[in-house]
Image (cartoon, helix red, strand yellow):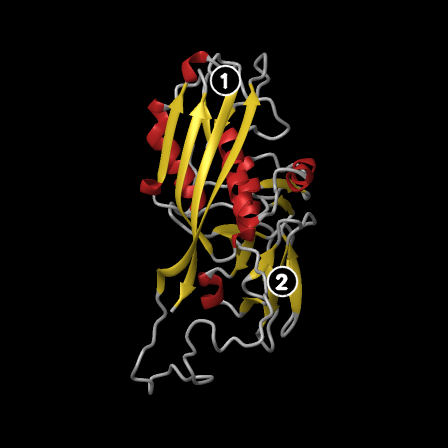
């Protein structure tokens, strides 16, 4: 499973419409095409339908950007570049274009590539009102243009852990196995474990990510695995990584520096996929794999988890509150 790939669900709402595609391997943007024939008059702005409706995962956006060749060779421009398609938008996607020519119309044919889609992860921002911002971080001084070519001294900010606040929390979760194969895979740490029954849950049942999410909630005080995750699940968001992303939104300037995960189960065997599992979790949390420790035990079969009836996970989380100096 490639953790760099994100699934975007697409509904085609017009006939003979092409899905967005990468023109070359490694491209950041996917070409998107017009679903209609349309002419944009001189100095006019129009919406070009794509024939696509999308369901973007929570925590992400699609940015609509120009195609460089089209911008170079024609006077057609993406008016609000980069445009944003939010995760909650479910209507047909339209590309807002402007013909900057003063005297010639631009005619777009159905199937012409007119823009690019770029997927971006986003963070929720919290504005905290204070009496004065002058005492927070470093005041660089100056105003507009103060860092131009006449400025001979470059000032930089450092992030250090001196005088930083450290917190620790513990998260736990457990799930029983489904009694029979229900065509739902067993997912742990955002990895698929082939050949095993799935865990019983309304979500994908990723008990490792659930334990990490609960540990994050222990830092922030915002319980995500409850009404918040239930609402997300009702909206069709069943991948546990999105519950974790939701919990991380409330971390503000706390940074995870270490995770210790303890897994109790008879099956599956964790050690053969240990490195892959650590890499998957590290990718989700933007964390070095060396900051993640994972142990697994059967507990001598003294509990139902060690007897093969389910999986229990404990997660210990260490975070620091970084300060700018």
Q: Mark on residue 172?
A: none
Q: Secondary structure at mark 1?
A: loop
State which quadrant residue 153 falls in.
bottom left
Q: Residue at (35%, 66%) from the top-left corner? A: 158
Nearer-the-camera pick, 191 or 65 = 191
Residue at far left of view: 152
Disc 1 packing (10 Å; few <14; some 14–19; many ≥20): many
**Relative image position of residue 277 (x, y in whole percent):** 39, 32
Nearer-the-camera pick, 213 or 183 = 213
Mark closer to the chain start, 1 or 2: 2
Nearer-the-camera pick, 230 or 263 = 263
**Relative image position of residue 48 (x, y in whole percent):** 64, 57
Nearer-the-camera pick, 66 or 152 = 152
Disc 2 packing (10 Å; few <14; some 14–19; many ≥20): some
Q: Secondary structure at mark 2?
A: strand
Q: Residue at (59%, 66%) from the top-left corner? A: 128
Identify the residue position indicated by label 2 in the image: 96
**Relative image position of residue 257 (x, y in whole percent):** 38, 48
| Res 89 visible | yes
Q: State which quarter of the image contains the N terminus.
A: top left
Q: State which quarter of the image contains the C terminus.
A: bottom left
| Res 206 visible | no
Residue at far bottom of view: 150
In this rendering, is residue 44 above or below 232? below
Identify the residue position indicated by label 1 in the image: 305
Q: Residue at (54%, 20%) from the top-left corner? A: 198
* Lateral position of residue 310 relative to residue 151, left or right: right
């Amino acid at each position: 499973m490639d953790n760099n790939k994100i699934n975007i669900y697409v509904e085609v709402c017009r006939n003979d419409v092409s899905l967005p595609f990468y023109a070359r391997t490694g491209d950041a943007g996917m070409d998107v095409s017009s679903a209609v024939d349309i002419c944009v008059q001189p100095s006019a702005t129009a919406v070009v339908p794509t024939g696509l409706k999308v369901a973007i995962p929570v925590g992400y956006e699609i940015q609509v950007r120009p195609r460089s060749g089209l911008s170079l060779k024609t006077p057609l421009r993406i008016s609000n570049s980069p445009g944003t398609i939010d995760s909650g938008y479910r209507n047909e996607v339209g590309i807002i274009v402007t013909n900057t020519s003063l005297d010639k119309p631009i005619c777009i044919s159905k199937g012409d590539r007119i823009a690019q889609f770029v997927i971006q992860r986003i963070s929720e921002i919290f504005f905290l009102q204070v009496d004065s911002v002058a005492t927070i971080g470093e005041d660089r001084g100056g105003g507009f243009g103060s860092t131009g070519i006449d400025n001979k001294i470059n000032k930089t900010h450092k992030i250090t852990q001196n005088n930083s606040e450290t917190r620790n929390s513990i998260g736990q979760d457990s799930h029983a196995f489904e009694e029979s194969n229900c065509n739902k895979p067993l997912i742990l740490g955002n990895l698929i474990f082939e050949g095993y029954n799935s865990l019983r849950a309304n979500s994908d049942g990723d008990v490792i990510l659930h334990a990490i999410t609960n540990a994050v909630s222990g830092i922030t005080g915002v319980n995500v695995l409850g009404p918040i995750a239930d609402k997300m699940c009702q909206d069709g968001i069943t991948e546990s990584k999105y519950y974790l992303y939701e919990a991380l939104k409330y971390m503000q300037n706390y940074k995870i520096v270490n995770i210790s995960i303890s897994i109790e189960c008879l099956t599956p065997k964790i050690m053969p996929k240990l490195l892959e599992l650590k890499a998957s979790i590290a990718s989700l949390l933007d964390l070095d794999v060396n900051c993640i420790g994972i142990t697994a035990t059967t507990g001598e079969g003294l509990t139902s988890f060690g007897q093969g009836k389910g999986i229990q996970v404990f997660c210990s989380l260490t975070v620091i509150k970084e300060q700018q100096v």
